[in-house]
Amino acid sequence: MPEGHTTHRLAAVHRDMFRGRPVTATSPQGRFDDGAGRVDGRVLDEAEAHGKHLLLRFDDDQVLHVHLGIYGRYALGPPPAPAPTGAVRLRLTGSAGYADLRGPNACELLGPGEVKALRDRLGPDPLRADADPEAAWRRISRSRTSMAVLLMDQTVVAGPGNIYRAEVLFRAGIDPSLPGRELARDQWDAVWADLVTLMADGVRVGRIDTVRPEHTPEAMGRPPRVDDHGGEVYVYRRAGQPCLVCSTEVMTRQLAARNLFWCSTCQGRGASS
DNA sequence: GACGCATGTCGAG
DNA sequence: TCGACCTGCGTCT
């Protein structure tokens, strides 16, 4: 689940469920006993997301920093909370419900200075009102690194992961191997605008759908299709299957230890407008 | 029950 | 560039 839209959803859930009232915090698994003890009984003042980082600020200015990483997930529900099962690192309980955190990359308490340091190294987040896409453009337009790598670099853009990376490049018709410095300014503007739109949709719907209405199987006269990650996408994890637009086989390769997917026809050099 | 896999990040070499 | 981290799930035995 965890790309930036997931974190923003989680921030909203935490606001709705816990803000303004004392929470109960425990670590059923035991690996966060110390931190849970320090949060237990505090009042949640604010919950926000920056990229894939979830920040929960309590009334004593401690900030709980959660990063789901690749395995982490939340289980949320109304009261009463069931007996915890599996490896629950942190359980927050309030009058409106509970939140169980399993398998996070990071679950730690930070002071104000540490929070600032964390945020200072993150690029603009398309889901945040204060995001400055110019900061990302300055990095991209000077870089020899490929767009595929730049879009996964959280110090360039904070929030997109492997799915949004693949889908946004497809939708813009950009070859993933194109160096940042060869990207045209209007292409970047289009990519950023698309990230803003797609990720906001992701927050609203709770999954990643990127296929335009005119390319859905129904519109193309093909049988209905369900992608195995739970959303409708053009290329992500569709290697060997026909491109939804041109029917060329979708390509895949390992790049910086991650799977990259693209259509060599729709995303050839010069394929974009 | 073993194994492989994943929407992520960091640090060693 | 590669392994470690870390958890649940699907697939294969």
Image (spheres, coloured by chain):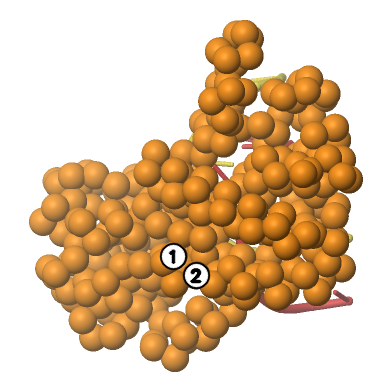
Chain colours: A orange, B red, C yellow
Which residue is the site of mark 1? A128
Rendered location of residue A25, percent (x, y): 24, 66
State which chain disc 1 sits on.
Answer: A
Q: Quadrant of residue A153?
A: bottom right
Assess whether mark 1 and mark 2 are in contact (beta carbons under 8 angstroms).
yes
From mark 2 to mark 1, how far is it between C-alphas? 5 Å
Left or right, A55 with reference to A150: left
Q: Residues within 10 Å of mark 2 (few under 14, many from 20)?
A: some
Q: Secondary structure at mark 1?
A: loop
Q: Nearer the viewer, residue A4 or A198?
A: A198
The residue under label 1 is which amino acid type?
A: Arg
Q: Nearer the viewer, residue A143 or A25?
A: A143
Q: Nearer the viewer, residue A13 or A214?
A: A214
State which chain disc 2 sits on.
Answer: A
Could one spot residue A104 in this view of the protein? no
A247 above or below A231? Answer: above
The residue sitting at 12% across, 68% down in the picture is A21
Left or right, A201 with reference to A246: left
Q: Secondary structure at mark 2?
A: loop
Rendered location of residue A115, percent (x, y): 44, 82
Q: Quadrant of residue C11?
A: top right
Residue A131, numbered label: 2
The residue sitting at 74% across, 50% down in the picture is A258
Rendered location of residue A196, percent (x, y): 51, 54
Rendered location of residue A273, percent (x, y): 77, 44
